[in-house]
Amino acid sequence: MKQEQIKRMEDAIAADYKNMVGMVIVKDGETVYENYYNGCTAESRIHVFSVTKSVVSILIGIAIDKGLIKSIDDRVLDYYPNYTLKRGEKTLPDIRIKDILTMTVPYKYKFNPYTKYFTSMDWVKFSLDKMGGKGKIGEFRYAPIIGPDVLSGILVKATGQSVLDFAKENLFEPLDINIEKNITFHSKEEQMEFYKSTDMNGWVADPQGVNTAGWGLTISPVDMAKIGQLFLNMGKYSGKQIVSEKWVEESTTEHSRWKKMNLPYGYLWWIGETGGYAAMGDGGNIIYVNPDKNLVVAITSLFYPRAKDRIEFIEKYILTSV
């Protein structure tokens, strides 16, 4: 990137994207830009919200590659044989892993019951309890927090490990990513501090020790860029196949669509209309991959309601400059 292009981009960040705290741009396998803002450094670790979903999707793919999960067509309740169905429940038994990955699960709530979720002792069971009902499987319904944890529960049951331990062994360590520990909250105040923190290294877990699937991972933009590069290289990193090429292809192909916003969706990855795809989290956290440009962009941001669109930022200031 030329100096005048960088200045134009950084001026835009200072004016319109003030909650951005880190960005890494990798072009043709080389880092062409890395910078940090708002007092953050390369050592900072940021809660990337729903980017966590895309990481969990990769872990599901690895578990399938290893034969620990038979198929995305497995019924969810096959992994919860002791789960007691509520009287009259007809939809939940038919929900499959694929339905969670594609956000096509119906839920028994109109508004997300966050307080009840956060104060419950088992976030996986809480999510199971809210699945099904009278809704129709196959219609896109984005579940920000309540619902994806069922995938974490499946990973624990299928692998015999915690999600974090399985991720360390099969994804993070091969990519030289250091995620230190489980993070648990003992009060609402601790949780609020977590959202604002820039130095907590870990992954949120519920009172049962099960890591969250829809949010809760803290990570740096350098490490996010490694995940993007893994997908750009069709599941390979440093010459080693970490996740199958087939899983990368399937994950980044449209399987459902959020009609309200006309946004295509893969397996917990957002699919762009112009060839790219992204893991996106609230506040403007993103791993953006563009195979045509051989490009990865990773951005971390502190939470800010209604943050400006990072895809628009990337298209305007980066795609035109590399």
Image: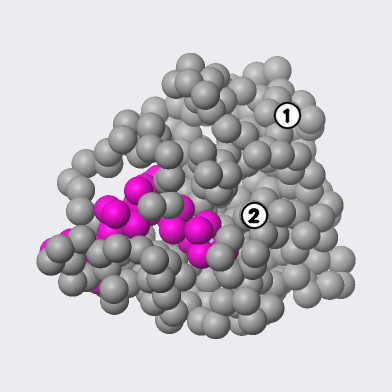
| Image x and y of residue 20, in percent | 58, 29
Say whether residue 87 is left or right of residue 171. Answer: left
The reply to whether the magenta stretch includes residue 138 is: yes
Q: Residue at coordinates 52% horizontally, 57% vertically from top-left?
A: 152
Q: Magenta stretch: residue 132 in it?
A: yes
Residue 13, percent from left and from top: 58, 28
Q: Residues within 10 Å of mark 2 (few under 14, many from 20)?
A: some
Q: Quadrant of residue 39?
A: top right
The residue that label 1 is drawn on is 44
Instruction: Residue 115: tell me if it is visible.
Output: yes
Any mark on residue 162, and which? 2
Colour mode?
Answer: one colour
Instruction: Indicate the position of residue 115 as horizontal and vertical percent values.
Output: 32, 31
Q: Main secondary structure of the magenta part?
A: loop
Q: List x then y, in percent, for residue 218.
A: 64, 38
Q: Secondary structure at mark 2?
A: loop
Label 1 sits on a secondary structure element that is loop
* Residue 314 visible: no
Q: From the viewer's perspective, is the residue at label 1 or at label 2 nearer? A: 2
Quadrant placement of the N terminus? top right
Q: Quadrant of residue 178?
A: top right
Q: Is residue 264 positioned above or below 67 on the image?
A: above
Residue in front for this viewpoint, 316 or 153: 153
Mark 1: give few (<14), some (14-19) or many (20+) Cα within 10 Å. many
Residue at figure coordinates x 78%, y 60% from the top left: 169
Amino acid type of disc 1? Ser
Q: CA distance from mark 1 to mark 2?
A: 25 Å
Q: Which residues are magenta?
A: 126-155
Front-most of 260 and 169? 169
